[in-house]
Image: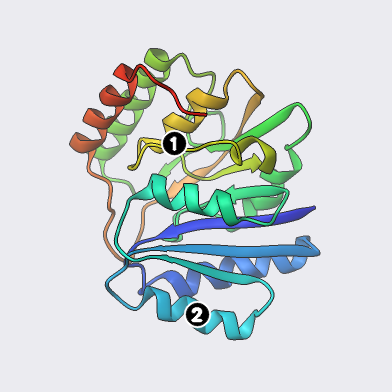
Amino acid sequence: MDITILAPAYNEEAIIDRFINQVASVLEKNYNTWEVLIVNDGSTDATEARVKAFMDVYPEHITCITHPVNQGLGAGLETGFKYAKGNVIVTMDADCTQDANLIPQLTNEISNDTGVVIASRYVKGGGMKNVPPHRLLYSKLGNLFFRILFGLPSRDISSGFRAYRKDLVKRLSCLSPGFEVQVDILRRVKQLTKIKEYPFVLVDRTVGVSKMRYGKLLKAYFKLFTKKNEHN
């Protein structure tokens, strides 16, 4: 299996080294052909320099694509989908909140029938650790409400830790720009493929600051729901 780990990154200089080391360690043990594709989304710190330093260590396995200005998670994913070489693309956050050891379990579930596998906090065995209570509440209620509103088959609609079959996401364009992109992708592909979930425990980040703002995300979800024209 050829695999690409796709991780958009914005101002993650403090954690990006650890992220790449963890992911590369798992990939070296489990895959013959692999790449880590970092989309540096207009970072103003040393994120790009840190990634390029790894390109000297893994010249055939690490790729960095840089947006000149910050465009948002959706733009980062769309760029990554365009340039990813792997037959299976695993999207991850570059903040080490997601266990890289789960990558093989996610990719093993990809098949001709199943084109998306979500590392899910809301199936048996999943959860969140060291996350503030108010964020737990917002996340659970938001996932439940918008899962019903959009008619999505998965319990965890906002997890960014996912495995995709390449042919499924290559056709996507004009993705929503922010964190709502995770829902945007699911609503577009839900009629095209089976979507599975695999239990996953998210650990709150210990370095850096989360870029997610729940108020802004809620507005983006409602805007996405009211859009009349879908682009595939």
Give whichever of 140, 57 is nearer the camera.
57
Q: Is residue 118 left or right of residue 151?
A: right
**In the rendered image, which quarter is residue 15 located in?**
bottom left
- Residue drawn at (44%, 57%) of the image: 8
Q: Is residue 98 above or below residue 45?
A: above
- Quick one: which residue is furthest to the left in this view? 215
Q: How is the image coloured?
A: rainbow
**In the rendered image, which quarter is residue 181 located in?**
top left
| Crowd class of label 1 (few under 14; some 14 to 19; many from 20; radius 10 Å) | many
Q: Is residue 38 left or right of residue 116?
A: left
Where does residue 28 sit, x and y in percent of width and height? 73, 69
- Residue drawn at (43%, 23%) of the image: 230
What amino acid is labelled 1 in the image?
Gln
- Residue drawn at (49%, 53%) of the image: 79
Q: Are marks 2 and 1 in contact (CB under 8 Å)?
A: no
Report which residue position mark 1 lands on: 182
Kindly identify which numbered label has been placed on residue 52. 2
Give whichever of 86, 200 is nearer the camera.
86
Looking at the image, tell me whether mark 2 or mark 1 is earlier in sequence order.
2
Where does residue 208 sit, x and y in percent of width and height? 29, 65
Q: Is residue 120 above or below residue 22?
A: above
Secondary structure under tag 1 reads helix
Q: Is residue 208 left or right of residue 152?
A: left
What amino acid is labelled 2 in the image?
Lys
Kindly identify which numbered label has been placed on residue 1. none
Where does residue 1 sit, x and y in percent of width and height? 80, 52
Give whichever of 122, 178 is nearer the camera.
178
Give whichever of 39, 136 is nearer the camera.
39
Where does residue 77 sit, x and y in percent of width and height? 47, 49
